[in-house]
Amino acid sequence: MTLISVIEVPQWRSSGSRTAERLVEGARLLAEMVPGGDRVRVEVAEGSTPAELAVTASRVRAARDGAQGFPVTLGGDCGVDLEPIAAAVRRYGERLVVLWFDAHGDLNTPDTSPSGAFHGMVLRALTGEGHRELLPEVSLDPRRIVLAGARDLDAAEVSFIEERGVRHLRVEDLAGTDALPDAVAQAGTDALPDAVAQGGTDALPDGVARAGADALLDAVARAGDGEVAVYVHIDLDVLDPGEFASVGAPARGGLRAGQLLGLVEAVAGRFEIAGLGITEYEPNDPGDQATLTPLVAALVKTCTQTP
């Protein structure tokens, strides 16, 4: 069995959500969903200034550097993945592709961010732009980013994606709706049979599930250089709020849990997985907890299997 290193980071102060304090409990619950492994809970700084967030980041880096097994980072807001991804960039160089599942781009800068919240800037910071205190030693090339499921993007983020070569796959691309009959593709998942809506990709026709997975695999392969390694980041708001709504910034039209798992399974079956981050769980519904518990366990199991 692969040794797992669980890094719990209950950071919430870099979130722009009104209910962000729930992220503390969310991080604890996510950690409980991961079976076995070495565990460390990072003490977070009290404030939300770049300097204070950098203190937490340094502690995450120390925890990550001390991890002996496959790193699973559990937030907390998306900012907790700054140092784990920076560590993967240092280790893998141009081989690394960051697969960023998120309803949002997280590609703003302090000058373009509508909220000023760092969790909406962390991916841009990894590319070397943002608060000086929060920039990595080695920047991530934007062309090595695959943004998956983003559907709520600011104008500045759209410009960055188009100008800097970020690969962006919409929910429609990931769901493979191009392989569906036109009437269904136009109407959306409400037009699908209930069994499909509930079961995710396992209940879809094989051609549909393959179309979405193939689009993602192609994007990852094109983003990498040679023997690709993939860091998988999951902001849980990538999920459709009709199925899972315990997040601070839900956006309509996301992935189903089964679809998300199927896509990660496809990536893990083809490429080495360099790390996994799961973030932005704001628990407020027992039904969401029931959805999330088996999903997290399955995601960790999938990412720790050798392709």
Image (spheres, rainbow, N blue to C red):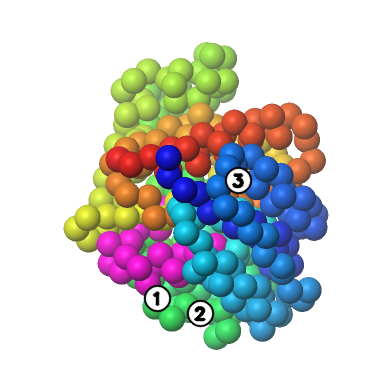
- Res 147 → quadrant: bottom left
x 56%, y 79%: residue: 134
Specify few, some or many for label 3: CA neighbours under 10 Å numbering under 14, 14-19, or 20 or more: many
Q: Amino acid at mark 1?
A: Ser
Specify few, some or many for label 2: CA neighbours under 10 Å numbering under 14, 14-19, or 20 or more: many
Q: Amino acid at mark 3?
A: Leu
**Is the C-beta separation of discs 2 and 1 under 8 Å?**
yes
Question: Which percent across, then down, holds residue 257?
Answer: 55, 32
Q: Which residue is mark 3?
A: 236
Specify few, some or many for label 1: CA neighbours under 10 Å numbering under 14, 14-19, or 20 or more: some
Between marks 2 and 3, how big is the CA–CA gap?
Answer: 24 Å
Q: Which residues are magenta?
A: 81-99
- Which quarter shows the N terminus? top left
Judge whether residue 198 can be spotted in this image: yes
Q: Tell me the element at label 2.
A: loop
Q: Nearer the viewer, residue 128 or 254?
A: 128
- Which quarter shows the C terminus? top left
Please tell me the numbered disc located at residue 39. Answer: none
Is 86 magenta? The answer is: yes
Question: Which percent across, then down, holds residue 12?
Answer: 73, 62
**First of labels 2, 3 by sequence position:** 2
Please tell me the numbered disc located at residue 135. Answer: 2
Q: Nearer the viewer, residue 42 or 200?
A: 42
Q: Is 63 above or below relative to 257?
A: below
Question: Which percent across, then down, holds residue 138?
Answer: 39, 78
Judge whether residue 264 can be spotted in this image: no
Decide if residue 76 is on the left or right side of residue 297: right
